Amino acid sequence: MSEKEPSEIALKAESLLAGEFNRTSENVLYVAAFETKTKHALVLERCRQDIYLWTEAVFDRVPTELQGFLKKNYAKDAPRSSNLNDKNCKKLKRGNPVNYWKFEVLGDLEKFVDWYNTI
């Protein structure tokens, strides 16, 4: 697999997210963007070997058992992936604080998704 092809785990994660959320961008190689029914944004990185997810800054509300999956908090002006842009996800682009998460297994992502769907 080249770095430009979605990984198997990312494709499984994308399928899980597509079953729970509304897709907000189509045919993007590196990311898959979604939003909840309450309009909270999240973006999956498709070409990684683990599950990497960008969300709105919600860490202060996340349950304790999910806090360990946070990889990094980004302040609103902090540099981040260029794939977080007007085309793919305006709410997560530079100018907005965001959280960056890493999940190694789908079960952990499912727990996070169940919670994110409630906010």
Image: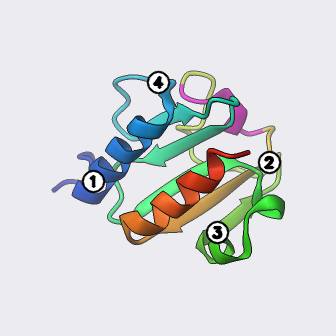
Secondary structure category for the residue under label 3: strand
Q: Residue at the spot x=70%, y=31% of the render?
A: 38
Q: Are marks 2 and 1 in contact (CB under 8 Å)?
A: no
Point out the image quarter for the C terminus: top right
Is 8 situated left or right of 18 in this image?
A: left
Q: Nearer the viewer, mark 2 or mark 1?
A: 2
Q: Residue at the spot x=27%, y=53% of the render?
A: 3
Secondary structure category for the residue under label 1: loop
Q: Residue at the spot x=20%, y=54% of the render?
A: 2
Viewer-closest of 35 and 99: 35
The residue beneath circle 1 is: 3
Q: Amino acid at mark 4?
A: Ser
Q: Are marks 2 and 4 in contact (CB under 8 Å)?
A: no
Q: Is residue 49 positioned above or below 118 on the image?
A: below
Residue 95, given in percent of the width and then of the height, sits at: 80, 38
Residue 65, given in percent of the width and then of the height, sits at: 65, 76
The residue beneath circle 3 is: 70
Q: Is residue 53 positioned above or below 83 on the image?
A: below
Question: What is the magenta range?
Answer: 88-94
Nearest to N terminus: mark 1 or mark 4: 1
Q: Nearer the viewer, mark 1 or mark 4?
A: 4
Nearest to N terminus: mark 4 or mark 3: 4
The residue beneath circle 4 is: 25
Nearest to N terminus: mark 2 or mark 1: 1
Secondary structure category for the residue under label 4: loop
Disc 2 packing (10 Å; few <14; some 14–19; many ≥20) = some
Does the segment drawn in magenta span residue 92?
Answer: yes
The residue beneath circle 2 is: 97
Disc 3 packing (10 Å; few <14; some 14–19; many ≥20) = some
Q: Amino acid at mark 3?
A: Leu
